[in-house]
Image: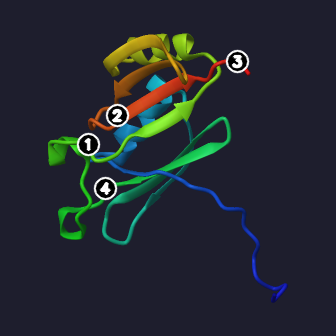
Amino acid sequence: MDQSQTRARTEIIPYIFYRDVPAALDWLARAFGFKEIMRVGTPSGGMHGEMELDGCKIMMGQGGKQWGMINAREAGVATQGVFVYIADVDAHYERARAAGAEIEKPPEDLSYGRSYTARDLDGHPWFFTTPPSA
């Protein structure tokens, strides 16, 4: 293997489409506790953003109908969701609710942990779960 190549670890990063990336960056920080790590304009006049929560990243942009990439509100349905393991689902739920997140299901105990479901400002579903103790 050529040692001059950059080595990167495999990482899966959701890329989410929002109508207004600056508003999404602010909202996700306030409601879900993400920290903004990048905000940059794109050649097409849009914006790309990156955020992290406990070292895990998400990315976002406007997408566009011409590329077949639109947000859940524009589509009228969500075709994907984001599942996040967190340490304290109840505290996270209270933060999201206080910030005006659309709560689909309040916290409940399920076979895979304590979980709640919320939608963000563009209708993407987010599933937050504290896994059961080992």
Q: Amino acid at mark 4?
A: Gln
Q: Which residue is mark 1?
A: 78
Q: Which residue is mark 3?
A: 133
Q: Earlier in the sequence, mark 4 or mark 2?
A: 4
For the residue pair 117 and 41, the one nearer the viewer reads as 117
Q: CA distance from mark 1 to mark 3?
A: 31 Å
Q: Which residue is mark 2?
A: 125
Q: Amino acid at mark 1?
A: Ala
User: Vertically, is 38 above or below 1?
Assistant: above
| Mark 1 nearby-residue class (10 Å; few <14, some 14–19, many ≥20) | some
Q: Earlier in the sequence, mark 1 or mark 4?
A: 4
Q: CA distance from mark 3 to mark 2?
A: 25 Å
Q: Earlier in the sequence, mark 4 or mark 3?
A: 4
Q: Position of residue 49 (x, y in %)?
A: 47, 52
- Give the side of residue 3 with respect to residue 55, left or right: right
Q: Position of residue 43 (x, y in %)?
A: 37, 72
Q: CA distance from mark 1 to mark 2?
A: 7 Å
Q: Quadrant of the C terminus?
A: top right
Residue at far front of view: 111
Q: Amino acid at mark 2?
A: Pro
Helix, strand or loop at mark 1: loop
Q: Earlier in the sequence, mark 1 or mark 2?
A: 1
